[in-house]
Every structure is written in C-alpha cells, then in structure tokens.
Image: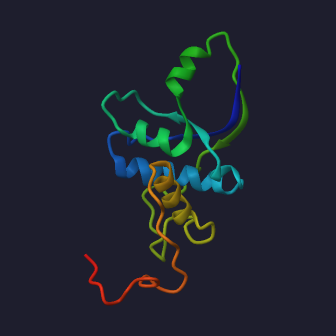
C-alpha cells in the first residue's frame, strides 16, 4: 500500500499534557519539516508513535494542524501484518530537538534561523480559521494607534 504525499513521523510520551505535546513534540517535528521547503506550507500527514488515549484532545489539534490527518503507529502496526507500506515522502521528526530546552535567547530551536516559531504560529492560526497577526519588522507597537490602551 502506497501512502501518498508528505508524512511527518514523530513520537511523544506526553499525550495527557497539551503544552508538552505542542512544544516538545509537534513544534520540533514541524521544525524538521521546515528544512524541506515548501512541504511545511502544504497539507501533510502525521505518523505519531503515541499511546491510545480516547479522551485526549491532541489528536484533533494535530489533525487540523497537519491537514491530511493522523496515522497512529499502533493502528499501522496492526494493519501491517502481512502487508508493506510505502511512503511517498517521509520526514522523521526532530531527533529530540527541543525537548524541555531553553536557548540562550529564550527562543525555541529553529525559531530564529528557520523563522520556525512564526511559521508554527501562523500555520496553527490558519488551520483553525484565524487570520495570523501581521508581522512587525521594527517593534511590537508597529502599526498600532498609540492613543489606544492595550487590554
């Protein structure tokens, strides 16, 4: 069986913690995908090595973020008895990039040199139907009316 398109594989043991799931698993995997442009701008599929969790919301978030859905490794393992799977394109996760890390500049790995933080944020917004904020080149108040109080 051939699985078309781009598939991004990663594993994470924090299925019950959305913060770890997003920033110690999905973000680093997406940063790996950014290294193969323009694949990170198109819909892709996730192949996740995760535990079965019926009440977890991460699957819905990850599914929408990727655009082509999620293949859970334990389901693929059950289907693979006597079968072969061929992936059209497979990017293998992050190599533990960013797990519980802090850079000297307090930025996520790949955030500066790959513009990964902005790309991750913008994709999350767009995939959930929200217009991403405009990019400010000089300072955070750029384009704002200074007479209005921020709330």
Name the residue rendered at 50%, 49% in the picture: 127
Name the residue rendered at 33%, 35% in the picture: 56
**Which picture quadrant has residue 16?**
top left
Residue 86 drawn above or below residue 26:
above
* x and y percentages locating residue 144 in the rendered image: 40, 83
* x and y percentages locating residue 125 in the rendered image: 46, 56
Relative depth, front residue between 137 and 47: 137
Residue 133 drawn above or below residue 37:
below
Name the residue rendered at 37%, 39% in the picture: 15
Relative depth, front residue between 142 and 54: 142
Relative depth, front residue between 127 and 23: 127
Q: How many numbered dots are placed on residues in this image?
A: 0
The quadrant the C terminus occupies is bottom left
**Outermost bottom residue:** 147
Position of 41 with respect to 51 (left or right) is right
Position of 102 with respect to 70 (left or right) is left
Name the residue rendered at 35%, 29% in the picture: 53
Residue 8 drawn above or below residue 143:
above
- What colour scheme governs how the chains and residues are painted in the rendered image of this protein? rainbow
* x and y percentages locating residue 63 in the rendered image: 49, 38
The quadrant the N terminus occupies is top right
**Which picture quadrant has residue 114?**
bottom right
Position of 120 with respect to 151 (left or right) is right
* x and y percentages locating residue 88 in the rendered image: 74, 33
Residue 62 drawn above or below residue 49:
below
**Outermost top residue:** 82
């Amino acid at each position: 069986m051939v699985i078309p398109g781009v598939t991004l594989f990663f594993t994470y043991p924090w299925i019950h913690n959305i913060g770890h799931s997003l920033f110690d698993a999905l973000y680093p995997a997406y940063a790996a995908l950014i290294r193969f442009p323009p694949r990170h701008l198109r819909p892709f599929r996730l192949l996740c090595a995760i535990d079965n969790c019926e009440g977890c919301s991460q699957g819905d978030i990850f599914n929408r973020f990727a655009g082509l859905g999620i293949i859970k490794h334990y389901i693929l393992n059950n289907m693979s008895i006597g079968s072969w799977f061929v992936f059209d394109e497979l990017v293998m996760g992050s190599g533990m990039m960013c797990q519980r890390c802090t850079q000297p500049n307090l930025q996520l790995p790949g955030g500066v040199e790959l513009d990964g933080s902005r790309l991750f944020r913008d994709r999350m917004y767009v995939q959930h139907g929200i217009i991403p904020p405009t990019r400010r080149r000089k300072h955070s108040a750029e384009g704002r009316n200074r007479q209005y109080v921020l709330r």
